[in-house]
Image (spheres, rainbow, N blue to C red):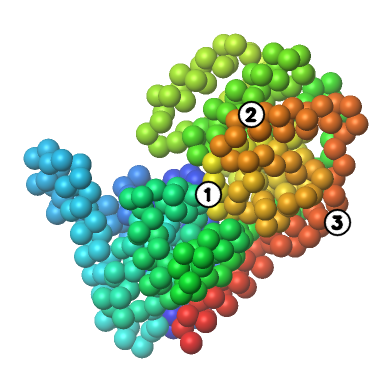
Amino acid sequence: MRVLHFYTALFVPTHGGLERSVLRIALALSDAETKVVVYVRLGDYDYSTTPAVHGVDVVSLAALRNIWIEPLASSGVPGSRMAAEEARLNFLLLRAEIERRMLRDPGSRHVLISFFLSHEGFTAQSVAASLGIPHIATVRGTDFGRGFHAPSEFPIVTSVADAADLVITTNLTQATELQRVVPSCRTETIHNSVGGNLLTCRWRRTHSPTVRLVSDGGYSHRKGTQVLLKAFAVLSAEGLPVTLAIVGDAERKQHAYWSALRESYLARFGTSLMLGDYIDAADVPAFLLGGDIYCLASLAEGCSQGRCGALAVGMPIVSTRCGELPDLAEGVCHVRLAAPADQDGFTTTLRRACRDVLTRGIAIDTSRVDEWKRHLAPERERAAWIAAVSRVLQ
């Protein structure tokens, strides 16, 4: 019997690509010979009433921390002290929970798998070393895209990459850069998969006098939502017949900013702009197929679920050259890429794509779309993860 201990900041039913990926991988790896337990650091959801999610056992470290952190929380200690105390408790509680399961079934083999290199990975590496079990660290997006360039986070990223038994990256840039600065780092790249409802869809442009821009990236500085809105405003002012639809959640701790910005833009653009909230996975295909260009101005990505969905249905894309797109779609005629953090470049790329749609259309590379449908299938991702875990346990 194998027991895989997943350590993550967030888990479903909280919305987000990380949360969905953790659930998807947990379900893919669970079978008669493999049990998965998910340990959740943050307290966004009370799992005490639902200790199993879709059949996966869940342990809330936030709930376990409460009694220990209560004296500090009620005493108004500084944030830096509170963060340090929480880090200590995360280590102790995660170790105790895993050790309890190890003692309960000494014949099983245990692996700790962390999601997010610069936070969960750091704690997981310490726990795995203290218990003498393998640690697989996984890189998602922000942990590399920000952590690799932040002086306070870079030493954490590199130390975890050096010590982990395996680092699973979600794109080749992550693997290349980690190996450049940490030559001893053992990496494997596994792109995310998408749902079967996207793999069976095929985008076709329907006749329309407007160019319909769509994005399911929500409202986040990391996704460049404010840059996309500004680009839409510029193109509208230039007389291009464009509409924009955005769906998704607002970034944690940025709700006031996004509420004000959404209200301002809706007042300016009325029915040519739709700013919606999170939609269920079942509704994503219809949302994408109703658009002409998928847009995302991300600062960084690991392997974007939204962009992979757009690849899978075979629709035009305007986004940034980061994450999985350089691996999968560099040079593809219907995928237009701008440099990350280049507002003017993104707007220019989007303008050209809109004009192409209006004048002659954008030719879709159907052979590449067929390749993506195979590559983004859940079966490929599951097989790669099973092989990676097996290698660590050899």
| Secondary element at tag 3 | helix
- Type of amino acid under label 3: Ser
Front residue of 107/229: it is 229
Q: Residue at x 40, y 63 (%)?
A: 158
Residue on which the image places disc 1: 17
Question: Which label's residue is closer to the chain start, 3 or 2?
Answer: 2
- Type of amino acid under label 1: Gly
Is 195 situated left or right of 36 in this image? right
List the single residue furthest toward the top.
268
Q: Dots 3 and 2: beta carbons under 8 Å?
A: no
Q: Specify whether residue 279 is in view.
A: no
Q: Residue 198: x and y, percent?
A: 71, 50
Question: Which label's residue is closer to the chain start, 2 or 1?
Answer: 1
Question: Which label's residue is closer to the chain start, 3 or 1?
Answer: 1
Residue on which the image places disc 3: 367
List the single residue furthest toward the right.
360
Q: Residue at x 40, y 37 (%)?
A: 252
- With respect to residue 245, does 43 lie above or below? below
Q: Residues within 10 Å of mark 3 (few under 14, many from 20)?
A: few
| Secondary element at tag 2 | helix
Distance (Cα) linking label 3 and label 1: 27 Å
Q: Residue 292: x and y, percent?
A: 77, 33
